[in-house]
Amino acid sequence: MKQKTFLISGFIASLFLAGVVSFYASSSPDGLEKVAGEIGFLDSAKEHTNSDGVLADYGVKGVENARLSTGAAGVIGVIATGAISTGLFFLIRRKPGGIK
Amino acid sequence: MHIPDGFIGLPTSGAFAVVAAAGVAISIRGAKSSLDEKTAPLAGLTATFIFAVQMLNFPVAAGTSGHLLGAALAAVLIGPYAATLAITIVLILQALLFADGGLSALGLSIFNMSIVAVWFGYGVFLLVKKIAPKKKVSISIAAAIAALLSVPAAAAGFVLQYAIGANATFSISAVFTAMIGTHLLIGIGEALITFFAVGAVLASRSDLVYGYKNQVSQLEIRAN
């Protein structure tokens, strides 16, 4: 498979998972939250500094439809992660021909 | 396993932030040799895929869910240094954009998931790869076993932080037992996802997989 085809397929799969499949994810507490609740230290958690943020808790503020809200947050996250991480990895990569 | 603010006291959180920052600095230097024109985009894609799959919580036991951590997956695909960086980028974006994982706890989470899980997972991968038959499928199996164990390893990192500086005073052994037990279960899901994801990349572009390249081919590349 060509490198370009491979990267585009992976990116589209990520968009699909975060944009569509994420709606069906389990909303039960995760392992740490569950343990914290059972043992009793869940109360020591403070509210998140950014809990009023536009994308807080993987939803777009103001979008009523849950499917759309989660999906859009997922798509924004995939694009942001893709752009920022690929940019940074290119910055630190070994430059062709260079010894530095 | 994104730690919220408040579970662990600020002095401990600060100390782990310093350790995490040092680990990230070392990883930036270490990743340089494994990242080139071809593998840098794969590293970006790995971070992107991990972000996406971390949104997919799967049920593990009564009223509990888990999601991919991605540490072993990233270590096998792009090498441990780049993996540390990939998971760190995901954790920072999740905390800043999505209010997932406390900002003061970011150093704690980076230590557990980007450093402990990645390097422990990579160690297990190398061990299993060494004793397994020299076949392509052994790479996926070694990655899956590494994934299974990397999740409780990250959980053990949290227990260490809890023991040093928790704001609550519940028994450390109770926290240890509950954390390891729950995260071994989550590790099974982690192992399955990692097995298929590594298998898919090996089937389409095995030349890009860091953990598949053997010593000989790396020496050849350097000699050229």
Image (spheres, coloured by chain):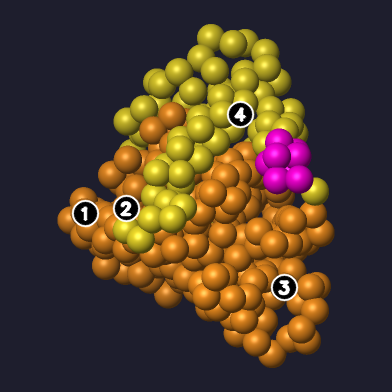
- The numbered mark at residue B14 is 1
For label 3, the SS is helix
Q: Which residue is mark 4?
A: A74
The amino acid on which the numbered mark 1 sits, given as a three-letter code, is Gly
For label 2, the SS is helix
x and y, in percent, of residue B3 in the image = 41, 49
Q: Is residue A6 magenta?
A: yes
Distance Cα–Cα, label 4 vs label 1: 30 Å
For label 4, the SS is helix
- The numbered mark at residue B139 is 3
Q: Which residue is mark 2?
A: B107
Residue at 72 percent across and 73 percent down: it is: B139
Work out which quarter of the rendered image holds the C terminus of chain B and state it: bottom right
Q: Verify CB contact (< 8 Å) between mark 1 and mark 2.
A: yes
The mark lying in front, picked from 3 and 2, is 3
| Chain letter, disc 3 residue | B
